[in-house]
Structures are given as structure tokens and as C-alpha cells.
Amino acid sequence: MTHAAALGLTCVAGLGVSGTAVAEALAARGERVVVVEAVEGERQRRAAADLAALGVETRFGAMELPEGVTRLVTTGWAPHHPLIAAALRAGVEVVGEVELAWRLRPAGAAPWLALTGTNGKTTAVRMLTSILLAAGRAAAAVGNVGEPVIRAVTRTGDEAYDTLAVELSSFQLHWSGSLAPLAAAVLNVAPDHLDWHGSMAEYAAAKGRIFERAGTVVYNADDPEATRLAEPYPKAVGFTLRVPRPGQIGVVEDLLVDRAFVADPVEAAEELATLADVRPLAPHNVANALAAAALARAAGVPASAVRQGLRDFTPDPHRLQHVARLGEVDYVDDSKATNPHAAAAALSSYPSIVWIAGGQLKGADVDDLVRRAAPRLRGAVLLGADRGVIAEALARHAPDVPVVDISSQDTGAMDEVVTEAARLARPGDTVLLSPAGASLDMFAGYPARGEAFARAVHGLKAAT
């Protein structure tokens, strides 16, 4: 019996980008694969036709476990999903795409530098990739960003990578049991996706799995939950916005300084970069840069490449993206802030703010966010499904802050939002779109929300 035949039949859950990549990779190995997909749209039918040419069957409609399945590969579905639950009841092994990719790595495969966190993952992993490229590595950002991990690990010849910067979500980590990255980092942990995990404890535990077999553990020493997750690992490296202790990376005046990956951490330190090398310059983004630097240093990258990589880094859109300056007021798009923890980081970055907030809070509490931000708020303009929850928190913690409620949810609502925000703003203020909630109540996603904001700001500029 061949190895492929011994594995039996693999069921792949979903025809998304990662699911399709998994089916292709397994078919290339000669394995028997069936894909189960609930939605039969044009894109899904095209993907199914391509897979059929490789001998892969796709079943649309009912979420039923195919007969004879010995392994199910999920791209992030929750344990309570009917298909996953059926597999677990039947004793079928359930693994994630990332776990499968780890198992299928060829001999001499590229090491992984992995990171997770509630917020900042994509920025940090792209910073890390920029640093690795500056060091001359053949590197790529993969996982929860970029190409699927399973495609990255199966590249061969001149197309192969020598280092992978891997962004991992809590969903991916839940289904990953044997990952052993060269180094792994937890950026921060705050309540999110509790509907998927069931509790904060389970969510944090999923994040902590990234450390279990890591060669070097990197954690945010300023984040209590990340620090707790690192406690079982005595040689862990912390990063901090404060002056670093021996064994940490941190900030000394305007310098990013390494006291961990040096010959004598007690007596010596090495300059990695300056605050001016970090863009956009905000406290949480400096933390992202420190995490990326720590992972790169764990892989032997010199300090000069850290600095050059940070200088070369281009931030992704909708992350504290400066849109315009009109009448001495700055307009900033932070639409990617889809939970209170992310919005808190943005709100701490500016001294006087007209805050545009609202959307789908997913049950998250905003009281602490509003209480901390209150001294910085010039005004607030609220939109979206859960704007009332934020309004109530503002009434409790910032009763003197003027609040404008925008009830409209049509395509022109953002124009009204920006007009009202401009009316509240004074010279020196920042009009900040940092919603603290998801966007699907009104928009196709957070990019569409940010683009609507930018269009409205430019429309305001044209009208003045």
C-alpha cells in the first residue's frame, strides 16, 4: 500500500483560497480528496472545475461528512460547526491548513518566524518580512496574510523561500498541534472572537499554543496576558516600550535597543533603529516594530538590517493612514480597528480627537475604551448597528463631549459622518476613523469603510 493510499480519504472544509490550496497540494501528492462547500457561486464553481481536473471531487450544499473520511482539514472553522462537530464525534482527525503545511514541509525546509496577537499581526509580520528582505533573505509573509502556508512550503528550486514570516490567528492555532517555529511572538491579548472560542480563557489558550514548541519565545512585556502566557518559558525575550532590562528589547529615549540578542545582556546593548524609522509613529506601532525586530534577531539578522527593513516598510492601508490635512485638522483612516483594543491603541496616539466610531461590536465591552479616551475627545460621530452602545458609554464617561448620532445606513452615510466631524473639529485636532467594531453592517469590509471615509474627506476638500 502506498503512503497516499494509507492516508485514506481527506475532506477539505471550504473552497476558499486556503481550502483550494490544500486540495491542490494533496492531489499533487496522489492523495484522495473531497471538498465540501456550502455556497455554489460562480467563483466556487470555477474553483471546483479546476480541482476536478486534478481528480478532486467537490460536494456543494449539505454540510455532511463524506463516508470513508479519515482526516478533515479546516481553514479556520469553529469546533461547533456541524461538519467539524460530526468529524470530532466520528473520531476523524481534524487539522488546520497551517498544521498540515507544517507536516508536509520537505527536508531542509525554511524555518518559521511566527507571531500572533489580537491586534497588529499583519503590520508586525510585514515589518518582519521587510527586515528579512533587507538582510538578504528569500522571505515572505504567509499564513493569515499573503499566500497560503501550504503553497509557500511546497515551493521548490529557485522559487523556494529560506525564511517564512508566519501570521497566525487564534482560529489557525486552535487546529495546530505540532508547530515548532524557530521563534514565536505574542503581540497582545484582549477579548475578541469569544463567540468562536466560547470564552476568554479558551481564546488566550489558543494564542499561547504558538509558544509550546518555539525555539525562542518573544512576548509583549507591557501586556499582562501575553506576559502570563510566556511565564512557563524561562528564557523568554520580552519587548517593551520602556527602557529594556537584560534579556529584553525596548526603547531608550528615541532609540530601539536590544539587550537580549547581544553577547552580554547585562553590560551591553545594541542600537537597532530610531523612533523616526517606525512608520506610522504611534506607541502600538513601535511595539510591532520591536516584536518584528526580536523575531528577526532570533534568526540571526544583524542590527543594520533591522533599521533598513523598518525604513523600507510601507504600511498597509486603513491602519492609521493619513488621508488629508484640511484647515489645520488631520483626517486619519484607522478602519482596520475592528475591536476596542485596536481602537484604544489609535486613540492613545493623538492628543485631541474627533472620534468616528461604531459598527458591529460583537458583544465587546467599550466602557474601559471610552473611559480612557475621554480626556482626548473633542467630539464623537457615531454610525452603524451598535452606535447606541458607544453613545451610552460616552454619556457615562464623557458627558461633556458632544456626540452626533448618524442613523442613516445608506451608501452616502459616510459623507454625513465626515461633514459632522469636520464641524466639531478645531485647528490641531485629528478626525480619527477608528470604529472599534466590524463593518459588515454597512460595508463590504473594513477596506470599503476606509475608502468611503477617504472619499468623503476628499469631497470635503473639494467643497472648501
Image: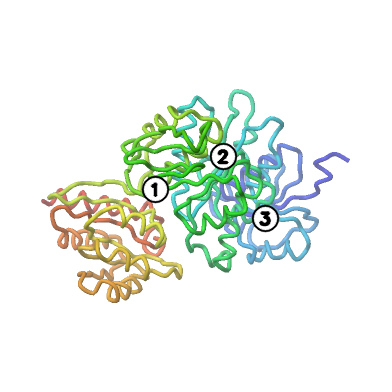
Residue depicted at x 53% and y 27% = 137
Q: Label 3 sits on what residue type?
A: Arg
Crowd band around label 3 with a 10 angstrom C-alpha radius: few (<14), some (14–19), many (20+): some
Choose between 442 and 230: the one closer to the eye: 230
Quarter assignment of residue 107: top right
Q: Label 1 sits on what residue type?
A: Arg
- In the rendered image of this protein, does residue 359 appear above or below residue 124? below
Q: Are marks 3 and 2 in contact (CB under 8 Å)?
A: no
Determine which of the numbered discs, if any, sits on residue 59 in the image.
3
Nearest-to-viewer mark from 2 and 1: 1
Give the residue at the far right of this rendering: 1
Which residue is labeled 2 in the image?
Answer: 113
Which residue is labeled 1 in the image?
Answer: 242
Picture coordinates of residue 142 (x, y %)?
Answer: 54, 41
Choose between 353 and 287: the one closer to the eye: 287
Q: Earlier in the sequence, mark 3 or mark 2?
A: 3
Give the residue at the far front of this rendering: 267
Choose between 382 and 374: the one closer to the eye: 374
Picture coordinates of residue 140 (x, y %)?
Answer: 52, 35
Q: Label 2 sits on what residue type?
A: Leu
